[in-house]
Image: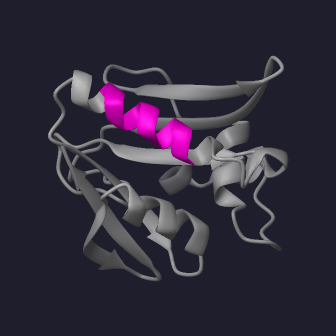
Amino acid sequence: MPFLVLAMNWQPGRDWDAERVWAAPEIAHYIEGWMRAGDDGVMAEDDGASVGCAWWRFFNSSDPGYGYFADDVPEIGLAVTPAAQGRGVGRALLTALIDLARAQELPGLSLSVEDGNDGARRLYDALGFAVVGRSGNADTMLLRL
């Protein structure tokens, strides 16, 4: 849960906490019932403390995530603690997640990135994600594997 809260609070001034995440079904479904069939992810540690997490979950068209692309393409989440940001942790996590997806022969990975989240956008662009849609103030991006 803490990493989903971190992901929701990417922008200064946001005030998501665990209670608010659980109260929002469109957000809670990213982790509710973890670890269900198909869920996977990787963690980053520094001196034994968790400093980042990247994960995926499959959704379907009847209950899509914000970055939903197709039933056979999982949507990813990524969060890094503030103290570890800017040290390459996000890139390492996302690269490890992409490697895991390739090993599992997934067709791709999707995500949603909100306008203004420029650091995340640069990372996704650099790793080959491309915009495939738009919803509200966010782009849906896809990395074909």
The residue range painted magenta reads 91-100
Pick the residue in front: 99 or 2.
99
Q: Is residue 42 above or below residue 69?
A: above
Residue depicted at 81% across the width and 64% down the height: 15
In the image shown, does 112 or 65 lie closer to the viewer?
Answer: 112
- Residue 45 drawn at (x, y percent): 72, 25
**Position of residue 4 in the picture relative to residue 141 (left or right):** right
Residue 112 locus on image (x, y percent): 42, 63
Residue 66 appearing in the image: no
Looking at the image, residue 47 sits to the left or right of residue 101; the answer is right
> In the image, is residue 90 part of the stretch drawn in magenta?
no
Question: From the viewer's perspective, is residue 12 above or below residue 110?
Answer: below
Tell me which residue sits at (33%, 30%) in the image: 99
Is 39 left, or right, of 16 in this rendering? left
- Residue at x 65% of width, y 58% of height: 8
Foreground of the two, 139 or 14:
139
Eyeballing the image, is 56 above or below 83? above
In the image, taking residue 115 as reference, residue 52 lies left or right, namely right
Seen from the viewer's position, the closer of residues 93 and 61 is: 93
In the rendered image, residue 92 lying in the magenta stretch gets the answer: yes
Residue 139 locus on image (x, y percent): 38, 74
Residue sitting at x 18%, y 43%:
145
Is 34 rendered above or below residue 135? above
Q: Quadrant of residue 107?
A: top left
Q: How many marks?
A: 0
